[in-house]
Image (cartoon, rainbow, N blue to C red):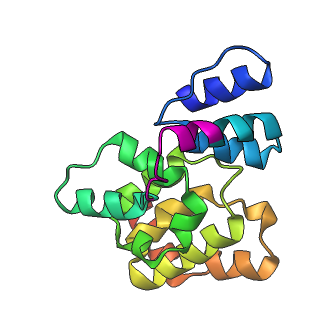
């Protein structure tokens, strides 16, 4: 939050606060949006404070570890949601309990989710554990699927069994 506010203020040529906590993020934003003056300022701040680039956090691993002992928080889920496409491509993602997979997708920006990766994840879960895959079908945009993909999903035996069980109960 403070990084975004500082970035916006810097872009509007208003006073802003650089801290050891947000300096590298500001530098990244300055480089990404090609703002040389902010990039120079952030670099000088980092050098003057002799700051070290923090190690990147593996949010998926953090959530997986905390899920094992049920100590995860909504913040952990939101962190994974912020890198949802990387998480979907990571084999460890399918090791999460189904409700956490669903929540990660629910918190993610739906426009950011790669539909092909989501479909592949759903197929993979059908093979691993169908009960984990069925809820994910609510996130799939069937209009973006090819007729073959729709057929494969809709005619999936596990999908039909799970849906029959759901509607029978």
Residue 54, magenta (yes or no): yes
Q: Residue visible at 48% across and 38% down? A: 49
Residue shown at 62% from the left, 23% from the top:
5
- Residue at the limit of the structure toward the front, as seen here: 48
- Residue beneath the point at 59% across and 43% down: 25
Name the residue nearer the viewer: 16 or 51: 51
Examine the image and state in which quarter residue 4 appears. Answer: top right
**At 43% from the left edge and 59% from the top edge, which residue is drawn?**
55
- In x, y percent, where is residue 63? 33, 57
46 vs 94, left or right, is: right
- Image spot of residue 119 (x, y percent): 63, 72
Q: Is residue 74 left or right of residue 38?
A: left
Question: Quarter holding the N terminus?
Answer: top right
Placement of 88 over or under 73, stated as above or below:
below
Instruction: Name above or below for residue 20 compared with residue 138.
Output: above
Horizontal and vertical percent position of residue 167 = 44, 59
In this view of the protein, which residue sits in the foreground, 4 or 54?
Answer: 54
Asked if the magenta segment contains residue 36, the reply would be no
User: Which quarter of the rendering shows the C terminus?
Assistant: bottom left
Count of marks overlaid on the render: 0
Report whether residue 1 is seen: no
Horizontal and vertical percent position of residue 85: 60, 63
Furthest-top residue in view?
14
Whether 36 is drawn above or below 62: the answer is above
Quarter occupied by residue 114: bottom right
In this rendering, position of residue 160 left or right of residue 155: left
Q: Which stretch appears magenta?
A: 44-55
- Whether residue 11 is visible here, answered yes or no, is yes
């Amino acid at each position: 939050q403070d990084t975004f506010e500082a970035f916006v203020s810097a872009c509007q040529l208003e006073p802003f606060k650089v801290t050891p906590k947000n300096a590298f993020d500001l530098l990244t934003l300055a480089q990404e949006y090609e703002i040389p003056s902010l990039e120079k300022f952030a670099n000088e701040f980092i050098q003057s404070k002799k700051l070290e680039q923090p190690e990147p956090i593996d949010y998926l691993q953090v959530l997986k570890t905390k899920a094992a002992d049920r100590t995860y928080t909504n913040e952990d889920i939101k962190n994974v949601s912020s890198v949802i496409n990387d998480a979907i491509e990571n084999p460890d993602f399918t090791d999460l309990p189904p409700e956490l997979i669903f929540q990660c997708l629910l918190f993610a920006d739906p426009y950011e989710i790669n539909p092909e990766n989501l479909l592949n994840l759903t197929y993979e879960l059908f093979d691993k554990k169908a009960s984990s895959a069925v809820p994910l079908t609510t996130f799939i945009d069937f209009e973006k699927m090819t007729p073959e993909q729709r057929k494969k999903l809709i005619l999936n035996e596990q999908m039909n069994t799970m849906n029959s069980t759901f509607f029978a109960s």
